Amino acid sequence: MDDPVKTLRARTGVPGLDDILFGGLAVGRVFLLEGSPGTGKTTMAMRFLMEGAQQGEQGLYVTLSESAAELRSAAVSHGWELDAKIDVFEVVPPESLLDSDQQQSLLYSSDLELGETTKLIFQAVEKSDAQRIVLDSLSEIRLLAQSSLRYRRQILALKHYFSRHGATVLMLDDLTTDTLDKTVHSVAHGVIRLEEMTPDYGAERRRLRVVKYRAQGFRGGYHDFTIRAGGAHVFPRLVAAEHRRSFHRGRIASGIAALDKLLGGGIEQGSSTLVLGPAGAGKTTLAWQFAAETVRRGEKVAMFLFDEELGLLFDRAKPLGFDFAAMQATGMLQIKQLDAAELSPGEFAYTVRAACADPATKTVVIDSLNGYQAAMPQENALILHMHELIQYLNRTGVSTFMTVAQHGLVGEMKSPVDITYLADAVVLLRYFEAEGAVRRALSVIKKRGGQHEDTIREFWIDHGLYIGEPLVEFHGVLRGTPTLAGNRAPPRPGIGE
């Protein structure tokens, strides 16, 4: 296998793609970029040539399907300009081939057209002396070849010709003809496949996979990517085992003595906490408490919202003592409102990683996993995505707080997504009725790495979060249908006690 340090790499310039390819495309080799129309092949190919131009390398875009004007227009849509270092060559058959009166009668027209097309490509390469070449697209050559044998011979001829010139070549295939023909796969040095999926609701989702890379390692599996103004952006699949940051695994407090006592002294730094409960029980407020205490300690927080509008959150949090607008203004809080209909799991993981690139960021709040699940209604690997993300945050010393809204208000409740086994600590919130009023109860049902109080305590929200005494005279609080053994509910202490 090639030494990854000594082998020269031609960087593609596509954010994230070079990471997957461990540096880029091997210089002087032929690569295949395949995908259905609209998956982003042309966008990535133009970025590949532009990256070469920035390095002083001559580029050549040979197009058999689009006009030069169309290519330049596509570049402008991304804010790009194909400069003098990039030649665009349109392969147009000679006029005699378009005139039926001038066509040869003793030769098959496909023979003549294939030969003429290849000759024009070779002439363009000779004239340009390019170091990076894009050939768009192989579907036209496959149609002219008419048979798999002739097509393979033609691809081999192109490969040998390009290798003699030492150019790095990216051949595009739109898969509009015989998609079962893997001729180019065996000939190309590497193969990258682009795919597009359309969920029942929301924007299309794009992903790519490196099918083959001869004599070179790469990051396997599927990787999400997007195409927006400015080009394509690939989000390499997160592998938590590749990341680790040294940190002191102490305990972090909530700022409320009774809550810290319930948690056995607090939450371990670099651990994950899941807050479960019905809608309106106070899950988000509990997570806010830890976020605000993190800022008070002089550490940074990153908060990701799937369910709540940002302005409403600021207005709702301030009367409770959480001035998130001020925290954001000082740079101690990063807060992002996410659109579940426009987000892929890879992009979300990338967004979280970017926010945690600052070592001062010690706490992440994800509110809620219901919204995260809604972002991926047809994803089958939600648990695996969350496992890698949680493990990544744990390994880098970031404490994670996640909320999940359970179905129902009282009685038996179910969670739409069960990641309780992944979380290091699980806090359960419940409603109960006492003396004609709806009240809230809190308990810790799991905590790795230490003891925790096994009591059930009442809590309430009144210009802040308050924790009461254990509910010793109640039975069935966790079931949501409590029974009061005594005559009266436990009194609440005065505010500030």
Image (cartoon, rainbow, N blue to C red):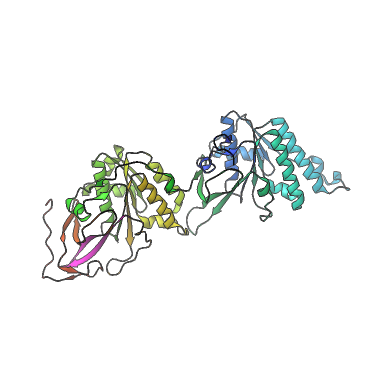
**Residue 179 shown left or right of residue 277 in the figure:** right
Quarter in which the N terminus is drawn: top right
Q: Tell me residue 82's x, y (percent).
A: 60, 33
Q: Nearer the viewer, residue 32 or 432?
A: 32
Could one spot residue 98 in this view of the protein? no
Q: Nearer the viewer, residue 370 or 155?
A: 155
Q: Please identify the residue farthest to the right as the structure is shown.
A: 106
Q: Tell me residue 433's x, y (percent).
A: 19, 67
Q: Tell me residue 273's x, y (percent).
A: 30, 53
**Magenta-drawn segment:** 422-443
Quadrant in the rendering for residue 53: top right
Q: Nearer the viewer, residue 179 or 159?
A: 159
Q: Tell me residue 317's x, y (percent).
A: 25, 49
**Residue 220 shown left or right of residue 358 in the figure:** right
Would you place residue 497 above or below residue 116 in this image? below
Would you place residue 307 above or below residue 78 in this image? below
The magenta stretch spans residue 436: yes
The magenta stretch spans residue 470: no
**Residue 169 shown left or right of residue 227 in the figure:** right
Q: Nearer the viewer, residue 285 or 352?
A: 352
How many marks on residues?
0
- Magenta region's main secondary structure? strand
- What residue is at 26 percent from the left and 59 percent from the top? 281
Could one spot residue 296 in this view of the protein? yes
